[in-house]
Image (cartoon, rainbow, N blue to C red):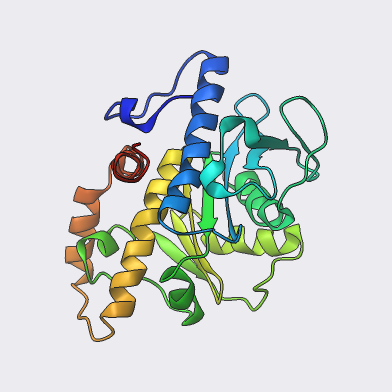
Amino acid sequence: MSEPLTHPPVEPFLDDPDAELERLLADLAAGYRLFAALRWGDLGDGHITCRDIRKPDHMWLLRARVPFERARPDDMVLIAPDGTAADQDGERADINNTAYYIHHPIHEARPEVGAVAHVHTGWGTPFAAERRTIEPISQGSAAFFENHSLFDDEEVQILSVDGGKRIAAALGGNRAVVLANHGLLTVGASPADAVGWFVMMERAAEAQMKAPRARPISAESARTARADLIDPHLGWNLFCTAARRHLTP
């Protein structure tokens, strides 16, 4: 398994399908372990998915009941469009069905999205309970200006792909969505990209919850900051920085 410390500054997308799948599953597992290191998902209340590179309508997900801090590539299972899942030996596997209900419609609606990340957090969940969006009150917050949306819906427990389709519709073409009374969700080109953006979104929610009287910068200034902050490798670099900090032995 590749280690976070060996990752280059620019995310590599490998031409060899076998090598690329191995890389993606390693980063998918590392994303779960990073969530655990940040003390998120200790009740299994979160999920990261990765689109399969050989079957684009399939996605990879952590097997049910595997603690996030123990996630390894071999713990990932492949989920078909109908929600059935098989481990890497082809045996039927148990999954978090809510992950399928939420993530599959997003992958289906957004072909360019390689990964989706969602987990319940100490600041993102209460922020979502207030049913508001992120304002440009800090540098990190500006990255989400006009780049996220609100899923203002009372189906807090997503019970079917219909709920996931409504989330996908609310997300639209954005990088992230606030799930009302539920939490935060981000998308990316890869697991590392989605997870890096998620960590930054949680920080933005924390800043807004801690500074209820904060004065946002202007829309023009927010757009300028966003344009300078965002590049194709931002999520990857955020992920690598956090992984070096929290996953180094």
Query: In the rendered image of this protein, does residue 155 appear above or below residue 168?
Result: below
The residue most toward the front is 249
Judging depth in this view, the residue of 230 and 20 nearest the camera is 20
The residue most toward the bottom is 213
At x 37% / y 41%, what residue is drawn?
A: 247
Q: Is residue 173 left or right of residue 214?
A: right
At x 48% / y 15%, what residue is drawn?
A: 15
Judging depth in this view, the residue of 220 and 125 nearest the camera is 125
At x 79% / y 27%, what residue is drawn?
A: 90
Judging depth in this view, the residue of 119 and 146 nearest the camera is 119
Q: Quadrant of residue 44?
A: bottom right
At x 43% / y 76%, what residue is drawn?
A: 127
Q: Quadrant of the C terminus?
A: top left
Query: In the rendered image of this protein, does residue 139 appear above or below residue 76?
Result: below
Q: Position of residue 171 (x, y in %)?
A: 52, 60
Q: Position of residue 41 (x, y in %)?
A: 54, 58
- Residue 196 visible at all: yes
Q: Is residue 150 left or right of residue 11?
A: right
Query: In the rendered image of this protein, does residue 167 appear above or below residue 67?
Result: below
Q: Position of residue 229 (x, y in %)?
A: 22, 50
Q: Position of residue 110 (x, y in %)?
A: 57, 45
- Residue 146 visible at all: no
Q: How many marks?
A: 0
Q: Is residue 246 left or right of residue 46?
A: left
Q: Quadrant of residue 3?
A: top left
Query: In the rendered image of this protein, does residue 212 appear above or below residue 88?
Result: below
Q: Is residue 118 left or right of residue 10?
A: right
Judging depth in this view, the residue of 35 and 69 nearest the camera is 69
